């Protein structure tokens, strides 16, 4: 199939307004939120904007027939390159499938299309007393479909769990164009748990076209504590003590001095500028519990050396404290032109040692690293600040992140807490998975997508998948036929 | 690879930025492409496409700078002008990207390098350059419109169907009843009960003519709150329309004339009733930053500028004596809430009016589609936004939609009408003025009379 007939057939499915194919129109689909980090850009051959499941299926069937790669895309806020079409092909942008189909109060579920924005689902259901618990920091922009693909987390996952704990069923377009339903209203159906297989599959097994998600009752009371410490060490020890006391806060976040200096001037959230680190601790539940727990946590923090402990109960005050945290990442633009955000997990007990190591690495590479992360579950987010235009900066960033990853894995951690592997970390997966581990995953991939056309070059190390080899061959063929002719 | 590039060398020679008002590299590189701006952007919300988002547009600007996209590629023109320049993205940007100046510079680049058809140049020159370049001319034109409305000629013309033929029906539906008398600087002034403080009112072009009574209401309210008000002679249109259309030279000429006109009044606050003008006036310092004679003066002038709601909310408002028993909703002008970050102040003023019920509408800070002259040029997108805004306003059951910008007022008027609503559209200060008793109870000494 040459380029012209591909475009013609896509327009036959979607109409002319649903397809982009001119090179200059494709430029803005060569990146996602990871572009300032370590992920390369790549131009697709065409971008499609379907509005129905049937259209998605028709696009996928066409791609299947033509042997073209398919990459699904939500808001493009991902940080591991998941929405970048590494081998070109067709991008399926799901932003126009943004309807909340049904909210079932009795069953506490919502049936949504993949393009629904995470925060807007919660805003729609909150008046009825429910919210969608996974709350990635990009929640005001990111979509439910993307959350499912990356198994997104967020500050409140400490208590409520990550996306996979909140997805009951999915409507999926498989790589051959068939439409299937996994799971459903009833928990724990018999057979293979395909819903669980789909969540976190990074768009490599299918395209989610509807998601049945769990809604969580909004807590009666919420309290946010801000505890300031002299240094990161004291703050991470306090974290261990809180969790060690058997308390499960809704969220427990740590921000270091560098982060505070970026955020405070931008948002005036009220973080003390002279603190070496602050903890943001949220507790929720019934009024009495929250009050008692708040006092207990405050006492623990003071014992652990907190120089100041403040609490906020009013919505506006809480929002302000949280705003600083949620916007911290992007506020880094104020300190340096580029940042590279890492996402690793270590056992909580190893937090102080890991932070020491990160500090050493920062000094060794002469690279400022800010720390802002989900301390409660040991999910680290070292943020490296650099300037892409300065010679050698990118190389130093990559070297430093490798060192950090190695250390985290050494102490028994994981490669990614919530951002996915994508292309960003694909060459590191062998650090944690054995050849047999990978083969087991590849078996699942191959049974869903034997041609290897769905989101190629993600998750598995370079050249690992036989499908990838095939895809490279197909790519060479396509180029010869002029499908990638620009 | 190098060979391929060489071979295609002729094809790859793309037009980049040159001349004056180049999108500043440092401002461009501040964007980290996180995508947080996407849901705040009206055109992205309507289309769901990346090129219609702030992040996408910044990527296009960067692509031109990097020599990857031709300045004259149709997508660049389309996207730079599809943008409403509502600056909602700026208000939510965690990295503090100054999007407004960037898109304005990109438009200026287009105007400098892209040939426009003769008729477009003629219309732009006539309307923007000639008509808005000198307020006297605009006053004369609005005088004609007033005649058209007051002689009931409008009804007769509407019956003929000629408006539909000329595609001017929408334009006419936006036009409110024109004020009986234009407000002319130097001819009217208002004194305060307890003298001492004084402010200078920025008249504006549309505000000083079509909406002259709104400006008078603002002056009365400010005077009731203890400051004498007058309008320096020689002031002109603020130039916002020109900046938004990439006509930087014309904008700078107007800016210099305004700075000259207001400099005699020392450091007195310059109070503005139009959000769009206020945002532009507050950016004179930036607009003239490369002008050795006016850079500092521009910055000093900008520092004096206050939106009237901002000015009134700064102090304690004299309690308005009259109750206004009505249900209203507030539509936030983009250039007030996003460009000037003024959002709580108008609401504070409305809450000071006894008997008034303020019901918030959904998406009160999403652009209504007015965006200067956008609703005249890109009717479809503007109508979609206008309808969306009207639906949200109608849902509140309010009988009045309160706003603080003439463009919004006209767009709301047309959108509400089209959606079958009879709700009135008014400025915050008009409602306050009513609560203070309006013009009749408080004839200020020498005020509102021709000298």
Image (cartoon, coloured by chain):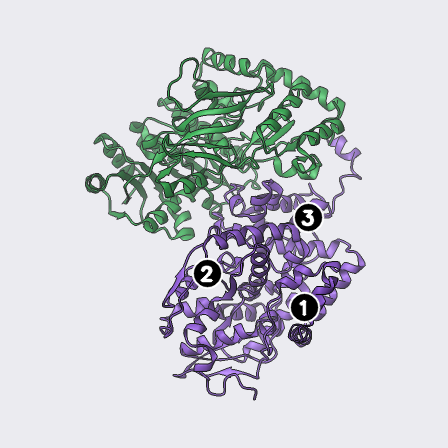
Chain colours: A green, B purple
Is residue B83 something one can see in this rendering? Answer: no
- Are circles 1 and 2 on residues that touch, CB within 8 Å? no
Q: Which residue is located at x 53 percent, y 53 percent? A: B389
**Residue A252 location, x and y as percent?**
31, 37
Cα–Cα span, label 3 and label 1:
37 Å
Q: Nearer the viewer, residue A257 or B336?
A: B336
Q: Secondary structure at mark 1?
A: helix
Vertical placement of A452 versus B398: above or below? Answer: above
Label 1 or label 2, whichever comes before in sequence order: 1
Horizontal side, residue A6 vs residue A117: left or right: right
Chain of residue at mark 3: B
Residue under numbered circle 2 = B342
Q: Indicate the quadrant where residue B9 lies.
A: top right
Q: Secondary structure at mark 3?
A: helix
Residue under numbered circle 3 = B78
Chain of residue at mark 1: B
């Amino acid at each position: 199939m040459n380029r012209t007939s591909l475009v013609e057939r896509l327009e036959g499915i979607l109409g002319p307004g649903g397809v982009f194919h001119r090179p200059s129109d494709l430029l803005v689909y060569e990146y996602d939120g990871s572009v300032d980090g370590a992920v390369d850009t790549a131009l697709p051959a065409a971008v499609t904007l379907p509005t129905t499941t049937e259209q998605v299926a028709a696009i996928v069937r066409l791609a299947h027939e033509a042997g073209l790669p398919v990459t699904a895309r939500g808001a493009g806020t991902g940080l591991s390159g998941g929405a970048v079409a590494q081998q070109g092909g067709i991008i399926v942008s799901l932003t126009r499938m943004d309807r909340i189909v049904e909210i079932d109060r009795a069953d506490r579920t919502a049936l949504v299309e993949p393009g629904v924005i995470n925060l807007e689902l919660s805003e729609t259901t909150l008046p009825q007393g429910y919210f969608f618990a996974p709350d990635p920091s990009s929640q005001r922009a990111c979509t439910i479909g993307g959350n499912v693909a990356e198994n997104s987390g967020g500050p409140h996952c400490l208590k409520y769990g990550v996306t996979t704990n909140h997805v009951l069923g999915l409507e999926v377009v498989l790589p051959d164009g068939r439409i299937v339903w996994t799971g459903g209203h009833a928990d724990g159906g018999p057979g293979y748990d395909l819903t669980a297989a789909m969540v976190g599959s990074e768009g490599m097994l299918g395209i989610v076209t509807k998601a049945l998600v769990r809604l969580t009752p909004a807590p009666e009371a919420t309290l946010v504590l801000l505890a300031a410490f002299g240094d990161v060490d004291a703050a991470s020890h306090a974290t261990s003590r809180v969790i060690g006391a058997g308390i499960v806060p809704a969220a427990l976040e740590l921000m270091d001095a560098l982060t505070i200096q970026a955020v405070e001037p931008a948002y005036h959230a009220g973080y003390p500028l002279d603190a070496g680190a602050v903890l943001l601790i949220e507790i929720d539940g019934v009024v009495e519990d929250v009050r008692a727990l708040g006092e207990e946590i405050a006492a623990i923090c003071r014992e652990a050396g907190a120089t100041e402990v403040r609490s906020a109960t009013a919505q506006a005050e809480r929002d302000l404290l949280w705003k600083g945290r949620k916007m911290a990442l992007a506020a880094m633009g104020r300190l340096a032109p580029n940042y590279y955000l890492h996402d690793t997990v270590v056992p909580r007990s190893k937090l102080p040692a890991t932070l020491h190591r990160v500090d050493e690495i920062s000094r060794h590479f002469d690279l400022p690293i800010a720390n802002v992360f989900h301390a409660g579950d040991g999910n680290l987010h070292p943020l490296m600040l650099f300037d892409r235009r300065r010679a050698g900066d990118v190389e130093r960033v990559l070297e430093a992140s490798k060192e950090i990853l190695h250390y985290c894995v050494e102490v028994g951690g994981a490669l990614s807490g919530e951002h996915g592997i994508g292309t960003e970390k694909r060459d590191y997966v062998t650090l944690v998975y054995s050849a047999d581990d990978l083969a087991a995953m590849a078996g699942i991939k191959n049974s869903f997508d034997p041609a290897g056309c769905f989101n190629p070059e993600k998750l598995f190390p370079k050249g690992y998948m036989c499908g990838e080899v095939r895809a490279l061959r197909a790519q060479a063929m396509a180029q010869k036929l002029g499908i990638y002719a620009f | 690879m190098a060979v391929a590039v060489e071979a295609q060398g002729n094809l790859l020679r793309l037009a980049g930025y040159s001349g004056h008002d180049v999108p500043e590299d440092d401002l461009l590189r501040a964007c980290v492409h996180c995508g947080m701006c996407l849901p705040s952007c009206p055109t992205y919300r309507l289309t769901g496409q990346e090129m219609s988002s702030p992040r996408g547009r910044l990527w296009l600007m960067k692509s031109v700078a990097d020599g990857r996209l031709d300045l004259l590629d149709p997508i660049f023109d389309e996207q730079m002008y599809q943008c409403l320049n509502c600056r909602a993205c700026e208000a939510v940007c965690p990295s503090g990207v100054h999007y407004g100046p960037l898109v304005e510079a990109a438009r200026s680049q287009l105007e400098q390098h892209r040939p426009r058809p003769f008729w477009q140049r003629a219309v732009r020159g006539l309307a923007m350059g000639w008509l808005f370049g000198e307020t006297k001319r605009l006053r004369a034109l609005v005088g004609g419109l007033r005649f058209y409305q007051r002689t009931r000629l409008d009804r007769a013309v509407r019956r003929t169907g000629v408006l539909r033929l000329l595609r001017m029906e929408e334009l006419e539906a936006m036009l409110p009843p024109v004020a009986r008398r234009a407000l002319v600087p130097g001819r009217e002034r208002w004194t305060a009960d307890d003298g001492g403080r004084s402010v200078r009112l920025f008249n504006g072009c549309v505000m000083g003519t079509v909406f002259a009574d709104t400006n008078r209401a603002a002056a009365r309210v400010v005077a009731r709150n203890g400051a004498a008000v007058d309008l320096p002679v020689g002031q002109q249109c603020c130039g916002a329309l020109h900046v938004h259309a990439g006509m930087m030279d014309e904008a700078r000429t107007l800016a210099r004339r305004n700075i000259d006109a207001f400099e005699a009044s020392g450091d007195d606050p310059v109070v503005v009733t139009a959000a769009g003008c206020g945002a532009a006036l507050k950016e004179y310092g930036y607009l003239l930053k490369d002008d050795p004679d006016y850079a500092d003066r521009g910055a000093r002038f900008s520092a004096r500028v206050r939106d009237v709601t901002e000015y009134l909310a700064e102090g304690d408002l004299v309690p308005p004596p009259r109750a206004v028993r009505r249900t209203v909703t507030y539509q936030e002008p983009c250039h007030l809430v996003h460009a000037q970050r003024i959002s709580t102040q108008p609401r504070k003023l409305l809450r000071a009016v006894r008997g008034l019920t303020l019901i918030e509408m959904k998406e009160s800070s999403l652009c209504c589609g007015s965006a200067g002259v956008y609703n005249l040029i890109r009717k479809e997108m503007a109508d979609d936004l206008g309808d969306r805004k009207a639906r949200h306003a109608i849902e509140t059951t309010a009988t009045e939609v309160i706003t603080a910008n003439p463009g919004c007022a006209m767009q709301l008027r047309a959108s509400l009408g089209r959606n079958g609503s009879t709700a009135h559209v008014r400025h915050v200060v008009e409602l306050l003025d009513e609560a203070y008793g309006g013009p009749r109870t408080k004839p200020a000494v020498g005020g509102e009379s021709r000298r």
